[in-house]
Every structure is written in structure tokens, then in C-alpha cells.
Image (cartoon, coloured by chain):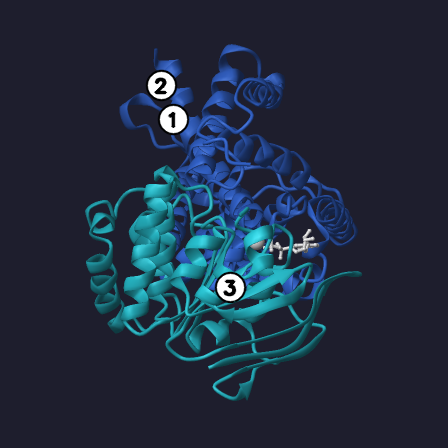
Chain colours: A blue, B cyan
Amino acid sequence: METLVQSLVSGILTGSLYAMIGVGLTIIFGVMRIINMAHGDMVMLGMYSSFWALTLWNIDPFVSIVFWVPVAFLIGMLTYRFLLKKIVPAGELNTLLYTAGLSLFVSNLALLVWTGDYRTIKLDYAVMPLRPFGIAVPIPLAIAFGMAILITALLYWFLVKTDTGRAIRATSQEPMAAALMGVNAAQMEMLTFGLGTALACGAGVLLAPSLYLYPTVGEILVAKCFVIVVLGGLGSVQGAIAGGLLLGVVESLGAVYVSVPYKDAIGFVIFLLVLLFRPSGLFGVGKS
Amino acid sequence: MLTIENLEVSYGRAQVLWGVSLNINEGEIIALVGANGAGKTTLLKTISGIVKQRSGKISYDGKPFDKLSSRDIVKMGIVHVPEGRKLFPEMSILENLMMGAYKVPKQEREKRLDQVFTLFPVLKERMKQLAGTLSGGEQQMVALARGLMAGPRLLMLDEPSLGLAPLVVERIFEAVMKIHQEGVTVLLVEQNVHEALELANRGYVLENGKIVLEGAGNELLGNEHVRCAYLGI
Ligand SMILES: Nc1ncnc2c1ncn2[C@@H]1O[C@H](COP(=O)(O)OP(=O)(O)O)[C@@H](O)[C@H]1O
Ligand SMILES: [Mg+2]
């Protein structure tokens, strides 16, 4: 029983960060129809940013996130403006290949400048986990969880309550009508790519103290991301949140009850099952 | 109010509109009729700026607007209610209406909303309902209402009766008449040729991208070609 609760808790903690990454991927897809293969590399860049801010400037990851998120937002918007804008109209397959190329470029560049060494972040307050009710909760993961929830909630509020957020959702649901209402689609796309990149990078910054860092860590993360958004229904924000939490819990239960080496594979098995039986996702409404 | 001269529009190499000229005066209801594929939707899209013309001139109140974006065009009061409603399905009715007023200052939105709810009281009762769950007729009402939220001087309706039962069509046309009585100029695109020409002051017939006939509504209703090709008489 205690093992079950323990693995549920760990699963939800990790899942909140998966959700944050997944929401980023799903809003980008929703608005631009880009399947962003480089999304995992944005997480990777976030992890290294976190690492270097600590190593070089001695800034704690949970402090450096305050400036890395806006920086990532800007980089995302510039990436859209100078690398993606022209290619978006070329269609989903072209942008998929293009972002896959971008992903190779970014991860190989990281390999070149940061080498392939595995690195870890050591925080002196993270040596002992908290033990509420006898359940081990690693401190960095707990803080990351809180911040991931805060950031995701802020984004959700923005999308639901503001004019611009509503225009972003409108563009993703019915781009032609949104244009007729006077929405500037290119502007919404740029903003969305900035937000999606900021979420990915931000999650990377938060995850860095809890995972190994290496330049190709993005590959496995982007694969997980696809599991998440397909679980939740591509383009759905609530779906990505639910999908992220679900994947976190499934992986964590799998690690305990099946075996640790199969942890990642279990997520993909669930993914295939969902695709087979609910192609529009667990919560999808079947919109094409 | 709106003058179009020799408009030519193509999608890639396929030319769709060939030298279309048309003129709408303030306060009129103009019907634009024609078969499927004639180019009616393309004409509306060109006026609202989401399709660019190859040549020809469009002017509004005497001012040419070839360099304007669709955003400027909405702001000037030319509002296009698209074919097939194109509502935002995962938004509530209220949110759809708010999107209609995207370019309208916040303090004016409440007033507009009241006007729209006076015209369509059912929408007020159900404003929290998701647009994707409404019936066809209700969706068309929301589409009209969303267009009104933008504060049109010229309202362009692309086949508002498409796929609706005759009784519902009547209600939609009644609403269009009311909107017109409140001073909005209307460009009505329809395949429902008879009703549209009865309603309209003047009409244009578009065939294969060319205007082949124009005239007063009742005149066109009596026209041999129109009766034969569109009314099946
Ligand atoms: N986006 C597009 N790309 C290429 N051809 C198009 C496009 N939209 C419409 N067409 C073509 O233009 C012609 C006119 O279409 P449309 O304006 O939709 O006519 P209508 O509204 O009168 O039915 C049709 O032959 C149609 O196939
Ligand atoms: Mg049409």
C-alpha cells in the first residue's frame, strides 16, 4: 500500500512537468499545425541553462527560471520569425521534417559545445527528501512540481481569460474565421511558438536538478511528449495536462510493479493502446 | 459605398473571377446568386482581404483599399459571415460573440452584446453553451450575431441558409431583414435564389466567375434566364 502511494506521488510530481512540456507542444500544434520535433531539445536547452546558471553564476535553478522563461519566450518568437514563418504554409509534413532537422542541429551543437558527458546538478538542500506521512518526496522535485503547476495555471488563465488568449484559441479552432474577425494569424503563431518554447525550456530548468543532463536527452523527451499529447488529444490543453499526469503515474507504477528498465516502454505501450482504441485521444471529441 | 471594378482573382494558375464589377449603395440589400463553384465565396473573401486580387479595384466610400489587411477591413465596418458558419466550436456562445468584437474597444462590447441579445434572445439564455453543440439554425444565429458584434456597416453573408430546414431559413431571413432595417447594408450570397431575390433591392448573377446579369430583385425574378437556370420554371 505504501509503495503504491509512494509511486503515485512520484508519478504525479514528474507528471506535472510532463504536462507542462506537453501543453507547450499541443498549443504549437493547435495554432500552427506544426509537429515540433525540436520541442524536446528546447527542454534540453532549459536543462543546460539551469546547469550553467548554477555552475557559472551560482544561481539556484528555481531562481534562474525567472529569467530563463522570458529568454526562452523571446528565442521562441525569434525562431518562429526567422526560421519557421515561411515554412508553416508548406504543410504538416514539411514542417515535421524541418523541425526534425532543427532538432538534429540543436542537439549536435550541444554535443559539440558541451560534450556528451552526463552531468548532474547538486543542490545542498536536496540531499535528504522530505518525508510527509512516510512518503519520500525529493525536495527539488517538489519545488519543480509547485512551479510547474503555477506556470501551467498562468498559461491556462491567459488562454481563457484574455483577449489575446482567446484569439489564440480561435486561431487554433477555426483560423479562417479568426482572420475574418481581425486576428493577425502570424502574430498569434509567433506568440504561441514563444509560449510553447518557454514552457518547454521552463520545464527543462525545473527538471535539471532531478534528471541527468546530456545533449540528446531531448529525443526521449519529445517521444514522451507525443505520448502525452496523443493521450490527451492533439491540440487540447486540458488533454495535455491530463496526459502528462497520466504518463507520469503510469511510468512510476511501471517502474515499481514491472521493472525499472521497462519504465519508458510502458508509456509507449499505453500510447499504442490508446491510438488503437481511441484515435482522437482519451478525452478527444473526434475533431479532425 | 462599395465599388468593385474589373476584379480578377486566381488561385495559383486557376483563374476564378474574370473582370467582376459590382456596386453597393448604402442601405441596400444586394443579392449575389449563382451556382456552386461560380466564385461567390471567392468574391467575398477578396472583399474581406483574405484572398488577394490579381488585378482590379475595390473602393469603399471612394477610397481604394488594395493595400489593406483583413484586420483594417473589419475595422472599417466590412464584416464577412463565412459559408458554413465557421464558429469556434470549443468556445461558448458568449466567447464566440466576444471574438466577433475582437477589434471593438472593451467598453463598447457590452452595448453591442445587449443589441445582439435583443435580436436573438435564445442566445442570451444559452450563452454558456459550447458552439459546437448547437443545431444548424442556432449556429447560423451565432454566426450572424458574431458578425454583428464587429459593428458592421456592410454585412456580407455567405449562404446563411445552407443546410437549414425551410422554417429555420425563414427565421434567419427575418433576422437579416431586421438587421437591415437597423441601417446595415447587406450583401447576401445565396443559392436559395428565389428568397434572396425577393428580399433584395438589387441582385447580381455570377456564372463561371463572370457577372452575367444584374438588376432589381423582382426584375431578375422575372428574367427568362434566371427562371430557367435557377428557379427551374
Ligand atoms: N482555396 C482554393 N484553392 C483553389 N481553388 C479554389 C479555392 N477555393 C475555391 N476554389 C475554386 O474556385 C472556384 C470558385 O469557388 P467558390 O468561390 O467557392 O465558389 P462558390 O462560392 O460560388 O461556390 C471553384 O472552382 C473552386 O474549386
Ligand atoms: Mg461558396
What residue is disc 2 on? Answer: A5
The chain under label 2 reads: A
Q: Residue at x 39, y 15 (%)?
A: A4
What residue is disc 3 on? Answer: B220
Tell me: residue B4, above or below residue B136.
below
Q: Residue at x 49, y 54 (%)?
A: B193
Would you call the spot at circle 1 few (<14 residues within 10 Å), some (14-19), or many (20 or more)?
some
Q: Judging from the image, what secondary structure is the residue with disc 2 in?
A: helix
The chain under label 1 reads: A
Give the quadrant of residue B79. Answer: bottom left
Query: Residue A288 vs residue A237: left or right?
Result: right
Depth order, front residue of A150/A86:
A86
Label pair 1/2, CB-CB below 8 angstroms: yes
What residue is disc 1 on? Answer: A9
Query: Quick one: which residue is furthest to the bottom in this view?
Result: B62
Q: Residue A255 at what x, y percent from top left?
A: 53, 18
Would you call the spot at circle 2 few (<14 residues within 10 Å), some (14-19), or many (20 or more)?
few
Tell me: residue A214, above or below residue B144.
above
Q: Residue B200 at what x, y percent from top left?
A: 41, 65
